[in-house]
Image: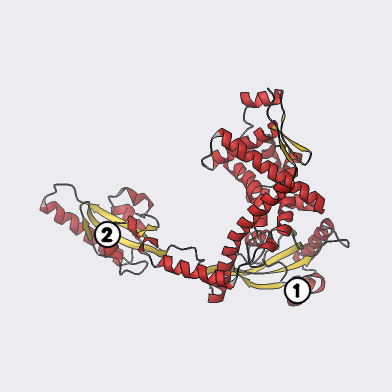
Amino acid sequence: MTIFRPTSVLVALLALVVSVPALAQGLRMSPRSAPPPPSSADTGIRQSDFIVAIVNSEPITNREVALEVQRVSEQALLQRQTLPSPDELNRQVLERMINERAQLHLAREAGVRVEESSVDQAEQSVAAQNQIDLAELRRRLALDGIDQKRFRKQLRDQLTLQRLRERDVEPRVQVSDLELDQYLQSQQAAASQSGNRQINLAQLLVAVPEGATPEVVDGLQAKARQALSRAKAGEDFATLVRELSDAPDRVNGGQFGLRGEDRYPQLFLDAVRSLPVGGVSDLVRSGAGFHILKLLERRTASNLPPAMVTQSRARHILLKTGSQMNEAQARERLIDFKRRIESGQSNFSALAREYSQDGSATQGGDLGWASPGMFVPEFEAVMNRLAPGQISEPLISRFGVHLIQLLERRNAQLSESEQREMVRKLLRDRKLDEAYLNWAQEVRGRAYVEMREPPQ
């Protein structure tokens, strides 16, 4: 099936993941932000710029590095991430820019091209991620001092790098059955260790003051037993907590949050050990008072995928691009198909059978039930935003241009073989990361790189 992943998430999207959502996240966090005032360092850069590196005859200037450092710093601040020292951050940013210039040079030599329609789609994707239209996206970019041409060039560069990495990195990675079996055995062994078991408890606390008289203690115990009876009778536990609990965590229903068993008091663990999920304990007496505990969740910490997933069933029409039809022409044709389907002039499955250039055409474009990660990321991202029955705008992927209709969704239990394939995909993702780093080093090693000292 053309649009299915070759059993893996594609690390080829790394560049787009780093750059496009980063810009989108910044827009979400500061929708009305104005351009920051230039710092004294930035003013100095404007007055006296200089070359800090040359990559295959292409210069990288101190100003370019400073602007990228500023962007990374602002993004880290919005996401509350810790940055290295200024010198180290400057070095890391410059090194990444050198790697990207070397890869873009390789892409040009290899004839990797990105059409305007692909850049249009990437720009629209950023707007969609921020739940705004294209005009509002451009307005916000302008407010942040980002020129539209520069933004589109960044998108084009990242798409180019994405396609180059798809071509050069993916074929390097395979996961054998032996590797898969060894990983599953290691995860099962880790799951048997108590430190890897996690639970989420909610508590209702009836506090007993220090030095309370026996009469006061008896009265508080009676209050706790009444609350326990209501909880075991099926009343909403979070509501009871907010009404009766003396603990500070009553505002969030008394939840401790999912945490390792080793982070709970032993008397709590003993009280809930035999409870099913959703069960309520008997009264637990501690130095703080009387506790009623509800077991909200129990899981074993591991890197295995969940057994229950949300599956989607979709159908699509694929038009491949090439010498006979470019991306813009394919998009226009699919836009016409969508118009005809929505107006009742044509039927999706009939158009798929007649025009789709995918193996699913004989089934009217029906792709069957698919678990998360089965389709390539660009396809899956659009499909996941659709409501059942809804038809997407034309989508450009590495395989051509698609029109997608989501038919339905369901929660499904994965079979053992499906779980194995999800684990195989997880392992392949990890190997792709490593393969990408090795490939990037190879590309840099083949490039001419000259580092320049700042002028004295």
**Label whose residue precedes the other's in the sequence (2 or 1):** 2
Q: Nearer the viewer, residue 392 or 176?
A: 176
Judging depth in this view, the residue of 443 and 82 nearest the camera is 443
User: Who is closer to the viewer here, 144 or 222?
Assistant: 144
Q: Position of residue 249 (x, y in %)?
A: 34, 50
What kind of element bears circle 2?
helix
Relative horizontal placement of residue 225, taking residue 106 as reference (left or right)? left
Pointer 1: what residue? 359
Residue type at mark 2? Gln
Left or right: where 1 falls relative to 429:
right
| Picture coordinates of residue 198, whole percent (x, y) | 39, 61
Q: Check the image and tell me how it is coloured.
A: secondary structure
Position above or below: 401 against 92:
below
Is residue 367 visible in the rendered structure shown here? yes
Question: Is 423 on the left or on the right of 363, as rendered?
Answer: left
Q: Which residue is mark 2?
A: 266
In the image, what residue occupies the spot 42% across and 68% down? 189
